[in-house]
């Protein structure tokens, strides 16, 4: 007995550095004080840490994890906690972890609380979307529960089957088909992106933000309750990464998983063994651009799917310039519907303002083209001999072009001025913005107010143009903006006709944001006491997560989103791969 005890103590001391325990109390509506404590002790690190250690040859926590999953006394709270972590690491659960997945599939999820069932179904959906190699195993597991002895479980099993056989589980396999049958890649991309757009428009920025905020508030309330009962600071901090890597909005969570699959596919096509492959990238760009014209561009208020092109264009400057040139041609084409031309303007302005990988020389070239086109348009209207009024349906491309210039200057003015202030100011003055804001078409009255106010503050600071007199006059004007009705008569409206969306506002989904953040230009707040705090145009900004603020009063509010327009490099900027 002494020898056995000594051996047990030795094994415990050997594993102690790798052990970390926390307790998840399960109440389930019972009287906590009258309910005996339940066994919810968990050993080992998080799933992400365990997988990483296993990858580097340390399998102690990995084996411990599998052992805990087969515990017959496992509780609902433990299952939910594990499943949340597995969902956040689903892209790492490759075929190398087959035995671990089979252990998870044997978890007793049926006959438990609705929270366990919902979490398990969510895990199944994510697993078959990200790792289709487990599709058959998941189907077999669900079908095995159709036993006559347990008819009460049939509804949950049917729900699981419906979830698994949805189109999500085919995304990865469809993309794999394009590797050996490239001739159908465009059609398959159109099919996949069309489905993703349906998810995207049903998960608006406002709803995603609200869901995340509600979850944060709920978690804070739960943590405060736990802290009042027990000192569990270490346990809470250990669980935080898991809580923040899964989207709170259910549609956004599904979209996030599928977007990660599509982004990984783009990277795999363009990079072979870590080296950029120009020819394959050009072919993929052409296919994605065709799908963009057919599906993405006409879709109003999509938030994330367009980032497929944003990500692809970040690989080489020539791709970004080709995309700008393509959008510019759409905007200039008078034979296309005005709604498409303005949508193209929205993409142009947002792309110019937000894409950090666009060289400053390209930004200047785009501003030159835009300002030249705007001045030509003003001249053509002034020379026609007719009274010009603010008719957005008639002059929509002009107003979106003006808004594009304003929006680009707001985001890029520091870069334009910081290298050489004198030359930068001379360049801004050469755009002759004063004539633009003072023309009869009165773009300051039509453009989004948040854009107008920010542009006015910046240009006043550098004494490039003074807009406030015109803004005040517009504010005193009680007549709303005029637009033409279908019958040709002028009607009035109290809504902003340019009220649309900024296609490249910050990417809210979590699984691929770590790659996109390096290519995205944010609008930052500044520390107290800095010189920028004295600038009027920084006043009134609403802080967002991690010190980043939106350009609009609420950059995630669809009521404030509007096309920022235009940009395009001249042909001389088009570079070969």
Image: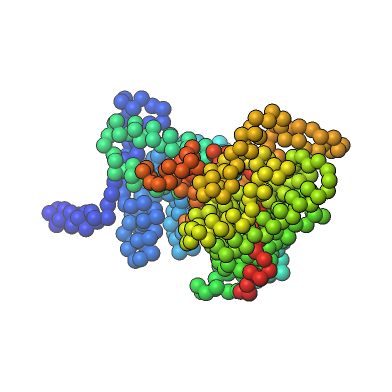
Q: From this view, report whether residue 275 is shown above or below residue 185.
A: below
Residue 525 at x, y = what percent? 44, 45
Identify the residue at horizontal 69%, vertical 28% (top origin): 478
> Is any atom of residue 111 visible in this view?
no
* 51, 409: nearer the viewer: 409
Identify the residue at horizontal 32%, vertical 52% (top origin): 44
In the rendered image, the residue lying farthest to the right is 487
Residue 342 at x, y = what percent? 71, 49
* 403, 222: nearer the viewer: 403
Q: From this view, report whether residue 490 is shown above or below residue 298.
A: above
Quadrant of residue 393 within the rendered picture: top right
Residue 298 shown left or right of residue 47 in the figure? right
Residue 175 shown left or right of residue 75 in the figure? right
Residue 293 at x, y = what percent? 72, 57
Q: From this view, report whether residue 245 is shown above or below residue 568.
A: above
Q: How is the image coloured?
A: rainbow
Residue 204 at x, y = what percent? 60, 42
Identify the residue at horizontal 65%, vertical 34% (top origin): 473
In the rendered image, the residue lying farthest to the left is 2
Identify the residue at horizontal 63%, vertical 72% (top origin): 575
Q: Quadrant of the C terminus?
A: bottom right
> Is any atom of residue 543 visible in this view?
yes
- What count of labels does the image hold? 0
């Amino acid at each position: 007995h002494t020898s056995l005890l000594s051996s047990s103590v030795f094994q415990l001391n050997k594993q102690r550095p790798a052990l970390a325990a926390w307790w998840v109390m399960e109440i389930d509506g019972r009287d906590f004080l009258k309910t005996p404590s339940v066994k919810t002790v968990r050993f080992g690190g998080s799933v992400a840490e365990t997988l990483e250690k296993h990858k580097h040859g340390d399998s102690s926590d990995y084996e411990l994890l599998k052992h805990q999953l087969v515990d017959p006394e496992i509780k609902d709270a433990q299952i939910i906690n594990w499943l949340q972590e597995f969902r956040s690491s689903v892209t790492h659960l490759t075929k190398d972890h087959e035995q671990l997945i089979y252990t998870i599939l044997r978890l007793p999820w049926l006959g438990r609380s609705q929270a366990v069932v919902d979490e398990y179904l969510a895990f199944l959906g994510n697993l078959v979307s990200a790792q289709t190699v487990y599709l058959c195993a998941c189907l077999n597991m669900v079908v095995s529960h159709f036993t006559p002895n347990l008819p009460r479980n049939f509804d949950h099993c049917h729900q699981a089957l419906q979830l698994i056989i949805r189109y999500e589980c085919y995304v990865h396999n469809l993309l794999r088909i394009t590797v050996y049958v490239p001739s159908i890649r465009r059609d398959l991309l159109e099919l996949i992106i069309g489905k993703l757009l349906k998810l995207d428009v049903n998960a608006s920025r406002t709803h995603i933000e609200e869901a995340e905020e509600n979850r944060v508030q709920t978690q804070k309330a739960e943590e405060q309750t736990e802290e009042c009962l027990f000192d569990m600071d270490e346990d809470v901090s250990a669980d935080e990464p898991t809580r923040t890597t899964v989207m709170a909005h259910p549609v956004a969570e599904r979209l996030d998983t599928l977007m990660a699959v599509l982004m990984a596919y783009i990277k795999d096509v363009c990079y072979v063994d870590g080296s950029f492959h120009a020819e394959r990238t050009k072919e993929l760009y052409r296919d994605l651009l065709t799908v963009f014209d057919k599906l993405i561009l006409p879709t109003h208020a999509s938030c994330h799917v367009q980032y497929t092109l944003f990500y692809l264009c970040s690989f080489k400057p020539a791709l970004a310039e080709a995309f700008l040139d393509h959008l510019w041609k759409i905007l200039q084409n008078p034979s296309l519907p005005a709604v498409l031309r303005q949508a193209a303007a929205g993409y142009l302005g947002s792309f110019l303002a937000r894409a950090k990988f666009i060289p400053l020389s390209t930004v200047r070239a785009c501003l030159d083209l835009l300002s030249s086109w705007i001045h030509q348009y003003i001249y053509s209207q002034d020379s026609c001999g007719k009274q010009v009024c603010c008719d957005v349906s008639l002059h929509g491309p002009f107003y979106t072009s003006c808004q594009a210039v304003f929006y680009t200057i707001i985001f890029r003015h520091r870069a334009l001025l910081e290298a050489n202030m004198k030359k930068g100011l001379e360049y801004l003055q050469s755009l002759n913005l004063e004539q633009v804001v003072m023309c009869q078409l009165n773009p300051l009255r039509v453009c989004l107010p948040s854009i107008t106010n920010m542009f006015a503050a910046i240009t006043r600071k550098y004494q490039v143009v003074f807009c406030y007199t015109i803004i005040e006059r517009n504010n005193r004007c009680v007549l709303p903006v005029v637009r033409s009705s279908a019958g040709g008569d002028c009607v009035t409206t109290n809504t902003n006709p340019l009220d649309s969306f900024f296609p490249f506002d910050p990417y809210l989904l979590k699984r691929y944001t770590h790659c996109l953040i390096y290519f995205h230009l944010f609008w930052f707040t500044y520390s107290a006491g800095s010189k920028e705090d004295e600038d009027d145009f920084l006043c009134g900004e609403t802080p967002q997560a991690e010190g980043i603020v939106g350009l609009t009063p609420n950059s995630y509010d669809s009521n404030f989103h509007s096309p920022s327009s235009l940009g395009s490099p001249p042909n001389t900027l088009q570079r070969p791969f």
